[in-house]
Image: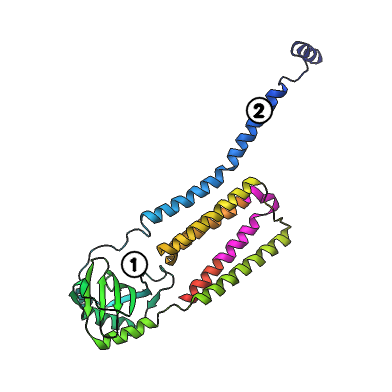
Amino acid sequence: MTTFKEKLDQELGEAPRFTQSLQEDILRQVRKTKKTRRWTYPLIIIGTIVMFLLIIEIGPLGQIEQTQHASIVQLAQQQSIKKYTMIYNSDEEIFKAGRPGFVIGQRVMEQSSEKELLHQLLQQATMTQMNERTFFRLQRDVWVEFEKGQVMKLKMFINEEDIGIVDYDNHSFYKVDNKELAKAYLDLALKEDAKLGMSGLIVMLVIFLAIQMLGDKLMRKMFNIPKEYVNSHHRRAVWAIKILNIIMLPLFMLKGWILFSIIIGGYLAVILFSSIFVDYYYGREEKRHYLSISSAFIGVLSLILFIYYIS
């Protein structure tokens, strides 16, 4: 064996087969390939978020419950109301009410007296022209389900003397000229105003941020996690997610999507999963994903408490 190796060395020589320039070129290509791969997963995450938002934009919540139905008077005369919800909405082009648990901040009308009051209003409604609507004091979106499963979406314009009702799906307008019923329903609608005002919302936001900072500091101390990013790729991925949050949250508020629990839940799931994955991908040796996991836990718990409080 030794003799064979000596002959091979004599034929090929013991010097390296790769020149210095060739070695440097190979190293550059390897580093370039590695850099591209490190961005593969963050780009997939960003693409997933963009596709999620595109689906919402094409049809937020789909076009569910948009089938034509009988007039509200006919349904009210033939069937009783099973359940309905009510929410404040000043935008006449968008309907915000929905099934219980589907929309955040709406009031679920469960008492028999509340359902009977609306039932009487619908039975006494008469069809009229849209331009005959008088000045109204309150505007509410009302989602109604009858005993046989038929669903109505109503926009109600409430005064002390009369009430205007728009069938949102069929685009027909009704009016109820009954002062007693109008006054009773006005009082009922006033009770459903949001429990949480702007000052209360700011207080909850400050408390949430304080808890997040405390949890972050505690996790860093427990597991000795440095504040600096692992590398430039980690920093870019984290900031990409932050920028998406800065852009998308105001968009949700402007479009009125912030009220829909299915959209908020889905968006939070994508964002939280993305943050945990990025921190795990770049800094699992330093246990950085523990920060994202604790932040996700605090965020979800705060959202649950917020929904419970305003419901």
Amino acid type, callout 2? Ile
> Which residue position is annotated with label 2?
26
- Is residue 288 one of those drawn in magenta? yes
Of labels 2 and 1, earlier in sequence is: 2
* Residue at image coords 38%, 74%: 88
Tell me if residue 69 can be seen.
yes
* Residue at image coords 59%, 54%: 276
> Which residue position is annotated with label 1?
95
Q: CA distance from mark 2 to mark 1?
A: 60 Å
Estimate how packed mark 1 is, as few (under 14), some (14 to 19) or many (20 or more) residues with alpha carbons within 10 Å: many
Q: Quadrant of the N terminus?
A: top right
165 shown above or below 42: below
Amino acid type, callout 1? Phe
Residue 72 x, y percent position in the rendering: 22, 73
Residue 118 or residue 166, whichever sits in front: 166
The numbered disc on residue 194 is none
Residue 89 or residue 263, whichever sits in front: 89
- Asked whether, in this view, residue 18 is left or right of residue 194, the answer is right
The quadrant in which residue 226 appears is bottom right
Residue 97 x, y percent position in the rendering: 36, 70
Tell me the element at label 2. helix
**Span shown in magenta:** 280-299
- Asked whether, in this view, residue 221 is left or right of residue 110, the answer is right
Tell me the element at label 1. loop
